[in-house]
Image (cartoon, rainbow, N blue to C red):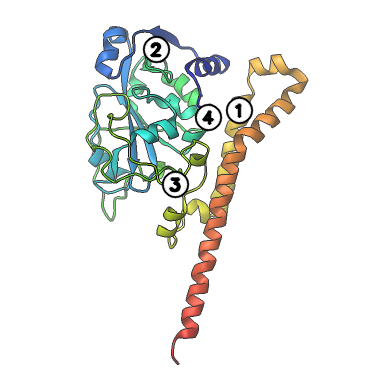
């Protein structure tokens, strides 16, 4: 199971993040949320949960008034004009593990969402505070972008603020400006039909309701399965083009170090030091082992798959050479 609202708020307190809580009835859109907190100073957010053709997921968090053109954003991410669409409901349940109407950057606290790409509206930086649901849409919390960044860093996410309304030219001499922000790892999820959702963003805080596609026989739908590496079907499709992370030893090591460092920082704070004292080292070590093991397994398997693929291709070429007539 994913984090609960109370667990998230407790974690924010442990990180010494200042926030103000506003309880209200359940809301599903920014317009409904504005009835209860729109009169307060700060910026309301709309949050989109998206998916590309390679089954990679994205959370785009923008000010309510920001115009997000998915076709333009898709090109800027290097996905082509039709590369982005609204994610299906099962992705919401299995990847973010939050109910409908509850998509926000805070949903990335769950381990199953660690490979989700997050794009933040640079307009948040101009606001005194910003408003988000803390995994439940019967509550809104306000906090500064500095404190939001503190939370994201604690879960290993580098806050990326971009101009979501920009439309820069993309061509041979002008590469996609946001392509470097796309997470290369693809989570496993049940097979889905291509036309699961519309590409037109709405003002709701996640995805439109729709009929769920059928689960493929023999595939588990647990969040644990989604924490691993791409499935066999995806690997065979892209066998000749292994990812950079899977082939570059330096990036592989850097990613491990980055993940470990962010987890250490998230576990060590003033409160934990006072409470645990001499037992802090043992506690941090245990937490690192528990929270980092799946990440390392995923990275190692990706590296292994790349090596196997390259070996297969070399063997195929060698076999072809022997079969060629003199």
Q: Could you give the CA–CA distance between mark 2 and mark 1, rounded to whole angstroms?
A: 28 Å
Sooner in the amino-acid sequence: mark 3 or mark 4: 4
The residue that label 2 is drawn on is 139
Which label is found at residue 265?
1
Classed neighbour count for the residue bearing mark 4: other residues with Cα under 10 Å, few (<14), some (14–19), many (≥20): some
Disc 2 to disc 1: CB gap under 8 Å: no
Classed neighbour count for the residue bearing mark 1: other residues with Cα under 10 Å, few (<14), some (14–19), many (≥20): some
The residue that label 3 is drawn on is 184
- Quadrant of image for the C terminus: bottom left
Q: Nearer the viewer, mark 2 or mark 4?
A: 2
Residue 16: x %, y % from top left: 55, 15
Secondary structure of residue under mark 2: strand
Sooner in the amino-acid sequence: mark 3 or mark 2: 2
The residue at the far front in this view is: 217
* Side (left or right) of 210 relative to 2: left
Secondary structure of residue under mark 3: loop
Residue 43: x %, y % from top left: 31, 16
Where 78 sits versus 305, above or below? above
Residue 98: x %, y % from top left: 42, 25
Where 67 sits versus 189, above or below? above
Which label is found at residue 155?
4
Q: Nearer the viewer, mark 1 or mark 3?
A: 3
Q: Could you give the CA–CA distance between mark 4 and mark 1, rounded to whole angstroms?
A: 9 Å
């Amino acid at each position: 199971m994913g984090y609960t609202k109370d667990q998230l708020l407790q974690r924010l307190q442990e990180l010494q993040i200042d926030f103000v809580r506003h309880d209200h009835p359940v809301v599903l859109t920014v317009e409904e949320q504005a009835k209860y907190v729109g009169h307060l100073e700060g910026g309301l957010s709309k949050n989109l949960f998206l998916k590309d053709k390679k089954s990679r997921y994205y959370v785009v968090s923008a000010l309510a008034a920001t115009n997000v053109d998915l076709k333009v954003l898709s090109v800027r991410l290097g996905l082509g004009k039709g590369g982005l669409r609204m994610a299906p409901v099962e992705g919401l349940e299995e990847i973010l593990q939050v109910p409908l109407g509850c998509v926000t950057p805070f949903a990335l606290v769950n381990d199953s969402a660690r490979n989700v790409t997050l794009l933040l509206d640079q307009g948040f930086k101009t606001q005194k505070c910003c408003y988000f649901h803390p995994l439940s849409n019967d509550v809104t919390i306000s906090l500064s972008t500095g404190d939001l960044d503190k939370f994201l860093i604690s879960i290993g996410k580098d806050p990326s603020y971009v101009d979501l309304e920009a439309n820069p030219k993309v061509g041979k001499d002008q590469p996609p400006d946001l392509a470097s922000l796309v997470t290369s790892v693809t989570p496993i999820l049940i097979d889905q039909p291509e036309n699961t959702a519309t590409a037109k963003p709405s003002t709701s805080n996640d995805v439109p309701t729709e009929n769920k596609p059928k689960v493929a026989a023999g595939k588990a739908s647990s969040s644990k399965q989604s924490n691993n590496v791409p499935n066999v079907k995806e690997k065979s499709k892209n066998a000749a083009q292994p990812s950079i992370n899977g082939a570059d030893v330096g990036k592989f090591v850097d990613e491990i170090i980055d993940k470990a460092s962010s987890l250490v920082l998230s576990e060590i704070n003033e409160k934990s030091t006072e409470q645990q004292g001499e037992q802090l080292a043992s506690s941090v070590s245990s937490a690192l082992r528990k929270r980092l093991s799946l990440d390392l397994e995923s990275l190692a398997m990706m590296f292994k798959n790349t090596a196997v693929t390259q070996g297969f291709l070399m063997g195929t070429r060698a076999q072809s050479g022997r079969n060629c007539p003199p």
